[in-house]
Amino acid sequence: MSQEFLIALTFIAFLVLFTIVGIYSATQKQNTTGDYLLASRKVNPWLIALSSMATGQSGFLFTAQVGYAYTVGISGIWITIGWAIGDYLAWWFVFNKLRSFSEEVSAETVSSFLGQDSFKSSKDNSKYNFPWKKQPKSDRLIVIISAIITIAFLGSYAAAQLIAGSKALHSVFGWNYHLGIVVGAIVVVIYCFSGGIRASIWTDSVQAIIMMVSLLLLLVVGMNYIGGFGQLWQSLAQIDSSLVNWSPSEHKFGFIAFFLGWVAAGFGAVGQPHIMIRAMAIDSVNNLAFARNFKLICASIASFSSIFIGLAGRVIIPDLSQGGDSELILPYLSLDLLPVILVGLMLAGLFSATISTADSQILSCSAALTQDIFPARGKSYNFLKLGTLTVTAIVLIIALADDGNVFDLITFSWSILASSLGPILLVRVWQLPLTTPVGIAMMGIGMTAAFIWKQLGLSGAIYEVLPGFLASIGFYLVFLPFTNKKNLEKHD
């Protein structure tokens, strides 16, 4: 048997495993939109933690993050540390409130939650200490605009996942990029149709384990090949002394500003519908603390492994720094260092990372399309599945038209979602007053600030989530004194 055939056989075996898990999850499903979108809010915290890790880290972990460490050296670790801190803070301050309040108002999507001017309870509204008595209705303009933002930028994010997966298939099998993208899209549709968000979460959990095992395996083999961490350090210093500089001096606004930018990036999880929907789906708000801590452990293992694999790749295969694609270093290392069957495992880990995120993002986009933009048809289970097919087609077109830079596409999509949806979600979960014009302006200002910051070429100094988030929150604080009881009652 040829090497390529054995790799393909192993890879296909893992895909079959994922598919079996997804199909089995369908035995637990109910043919309702609430089950398709939120798994009836009954998901085990172990699964929420693993799924959040897999869908949050995605193809970025195996391609963009490895490639970034390969290019910049050990200083790339600060992105991982900053992101982990911000993500943990997001879970700590936001997820519990979102889980409780979204159930109170029966919100099944992030956009429908953002459109709630208050949190109506069938028991006792007073326990939420509302600053006004009259409760406004759901704000359709905020719902629609946030849904459009979700479809546009979360769709682009999903396209980046398909691109990352296609890069892996191209590097190992020599497939055309477009063929890998189409294969990824087909697999995503199978997962989504088999059981909605439940299938996504269950398969994500299996994929998260494979992601961690495959990364740790390659890290151990790579370090053994080099001769240990000490030898890695010496070799990197010989190649370029900047590769072992913990805090490069070229950051325009200094290291602290750079680091805070990536803390804000991690906190930007509050603007990612495919992640926030997991907080809404957990079986109890009391289990979120466990899910948060377990997720942090799993994500840290995977992220630090990814960084050091990139560093090892710079020593073992230095030629990619001369015009090659550094985002392909992980599959190249696998082919050079691992037995054939383990190359299949590594490829499955990489493909898992991309698919685990893409299916979640496509489900969130289809929910935004069918539930938020066309609510009159929103309770139709078949219409929801048609929405999934429609969104997948849009994502496929974006992926086929893109130039293939996963790092840029993911970081830009993440920043726009974080800067536009994140601030208004904070206002909602903290039960602060908000009028329609201010809410819409917040989304527009956050998005615009992040976009301008990136266009000015300042993202390398401070990741654009921070200025985008601050601009939106700053605007809200300026108008907060005018958003009083009289304004809210008039708005109703």
Image (cartoon, helix red, strand yellow):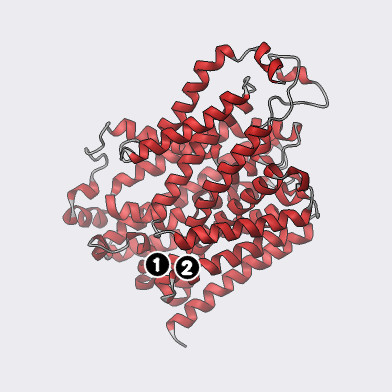
**Which mark is on residue 331?**
1
User: Can you name the residue that lies furthest to the bottom here?
Assistant: 1
Q: Whole-Å distance between the Cαs marked 2 and 1?
A: 7 Å
Give the residue drawn at x 55%, y 65%.
184
Residue type pointed to by label 1: Pro
Residue 324, percent from left and from top: 28, 64
Instruction: Please state which of residues 406 and 220 is positioned toward the viewer in this rendering.
Output: 406
Quadrant for the C terminus in the image: top right
156 to 93, vertically: above or below: below
Instruction: Please state which of residues 405 and 398 is positioned toward the viewer in this rendering.
Output: 398
Q: Secondary structure at mark 1?
A: helix
Q: Do we see residue 275 in this rendering?
A: no
Give the residue drawn at x 47%, y 88%.
1
Residue 479, percent from left and from top: 53, 16
Give the residue drawn at x 44%, y 86%.
2
Mark 2 crowd level (few <14, some 14–19, many ≥20, 10 Å Cα): many
User: Can you name the residue that lies furthest to the right here?
Assistant: 123
In the image: residue 42, left or right of residue 168: right
Q: Do we see residue 417 in this rendering?
A: yes
Q: Which residue is mark 2?
A: 347
Residue 459, percent from left and from top: 34, 39
Residue type pointed to by label 2: Leu
Q: Quadrant of residue 221?
A: bottom left
